[in-house]
Image (cartoon, helix red, strand yellow):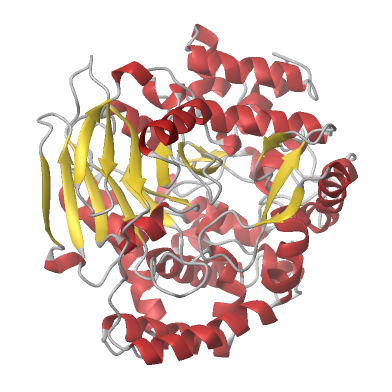
Amino acid sequence: MKFIRINLETGKVTEGEVPEAYCEWGGRGLTSLLIRAEVPPTCDPLGPENKLVFAPGLLSGTPLANTSRISVGAKSPLTGTIKESNAGGTMADDLARLGIAALVFEGKAAADRLWYLHIDGQGKARLHPADPYRGWRTYALVEEFHRIHGKGHSIMAIGPAGERCFPVASIQATDIDGRPCRAAGRGGLGAVMGSKGLKALVVDQRGKGSVPLADAEAFKDAASRFVRAVRAVPHSGQVLPKYGTAGLVAPVNAMGAFPSFNARKGVFDEWEKISGETLARTIEERGGNPSHMGCARCIIHCSNEYVDDRGRYVTSSLEYETLWALGGMIGNGDLDSIARLDFLCDDIGVDTISTGVAVAVAMDAGYRAFGDWRAAAEIVEEIARGTEMGSIFGNGPVAVGRHFQNPRVPVVKGQSISAYDPRALQGNAVTYATSPMGADHTAGNLVGPSMAGKLDPLKAEGQVEASRNAQIRVAAIDATGLCVFVMGAVNTPEGEEALLRILEARSGTRLGPEGLREMGVRILKAEREFNRLAGFTPEDDRLPEFFYKEPLPPHNQVVLIGPKELDSTFDF
């Protein structure tokens, strides 16, 4: 495996062996350790000292299922913290099978220059001018690159929002069908990519090799056992293939944890119109695909292909978080409009969560009426054009709240919460507050244990410990390149044991029963140390005041977990 460092200021591309410090790491483990070691914590996130790292997981490119997640790391312009943003699709698998452990982008191009990186089938990287594509949206850009280089290429790219360095900008990644509908969305890393003058990565999928395994037979045996464990878990084996992540709309709404109308309510009265059941039925009736394989090596098929009433492609995949952010959070119960908004966000390259929450904050302040999806579409278009109002929304929910003088901005460290209200899901209050990367459900989502009755979501008891353990385990999984939807299997004795044996067979290094925990703790310590040196203190690990003072209907609950308990989360 090799590192490729690309200096956008000089145009120099340097290949080398993986540094010893990162030899046993991939994914989030590699990106976070490298950012901690090589990026000054107090640097300008959009300046030349920041670095942008793309790293497939430790298990990406191997025969193991569901290992096609790629980690993108940098200092975030949205939060000011360290950030790892995670995307599916095909890029991780392709980079790993070309023997590439990481792409590290350094410096920044001259203000009038724009580049893209092409990697051929032998793993040779070369910068090409991208000035003709300035301002291009992602779908047209991907189509053009496929015309130039051929269909067999994985692509990650930014749209106009990233070029404008807006902190809500995403990096879009192509799915297995070559559409830029997967996203490294959170944290504004699309803005970092834009600041460096990098428009896209284009990677040839032909001529790929195989990832070396220390013990191929042991790997094959353990991988088979792991797949059985994934399929045995009801959520990954049944619910996700049938409804995708949208299957969460009904149960989370029933819990009173579905924040709507800028988190003024915990239920959305029109939830049935946007539920997983309605989504799957609508897609089937129109001839779309409700159980789509969006990522390489996926056995879960949680993706979907949403089509209009004439059977024409609209977007893929319509996810739970987007159904919430562009649906209930802005008071919109129209499924077709949510799909159109999702496509628009992907096309201009913005995070659907941050964008939806920014719109909700503005609607809550009276800028537009709740439920007006056309107004939401106009706002997204203004972000693409970089108008004065578009710039306000492009800077995220905090900027929107400041402009409209609305203090009800549901963020931590500048990043918005996601589709689980912390007042009705107390464990996620801990995760939102203490995650090193700002409010982020993927850092340690406790909706599963709460739905299973293992935690009382309305009480404080046990939530800090549960969040701590979840965040440790997720950090480790993010380092492997595995999809987080295998977590249910990893949390079984059979699944965890199989994964440990897989990691041993991959590297040849023996792991004890605490192997995953040790990985996760080391990653979190590196991330927290970066933040400390950047000036963050325990006072930053707090939720907005209204979550503590404003009861959430229907349970009329507030967040119960105070500063002392939050500060104990990472007592490793």
**Residue for point 40% across, 78% down:** 516
Point out the residue furthest to the top here.
Answer: 388
Up the image or down, 270 lies above or below 194; here it is below
Where residue 71 appears, x then y in whole percent?
38, 54
Up the image or down, 11 lies above or below 33; here it is above
**Left or right: residue 2 compared with residue 205:** left
Q: Is residue 81 visible?
A: no
Q: Give 451 or 300, whichever is nearer the viewer.
A: 300
Up the image or down, 34 lies above or below 473; here it is above
Where residue 381 appears, x then y in whole percent?
58, 16
Q: Quadrant of residue 243?
A: bottom right
**Residue for point 72% across, 23% down:** 364
Q: Is residue 279 visible?
A: yes
Q: Quadrant of the C terminus?
A: bottom left
**Left or right: residue 290 compared with residue 116:** right
**Left or right: residue 130 compared with residue 327:** left
Where residue 5 appears, x then y in whole percent?
16, 46
Q: Quadrant of the N terminus?
A: bottom left
**Residue for point 35% across, 91% down:** 512
Up the image or down, 390 lies above or below 318; here it is above
Q: How many marks?
A: 0
Where residue 356 appears, x then y in whole percent?
64, 31
Q: Give 328 or 265, whichever is nearer the viewer.
A: 328
Q: Quadrant of residue 344?
A: top right
Q: Give 438 or 550, whichever is nearer the viewer.
A: 438
**Left or right: residue 251 compared with residue 73:** right
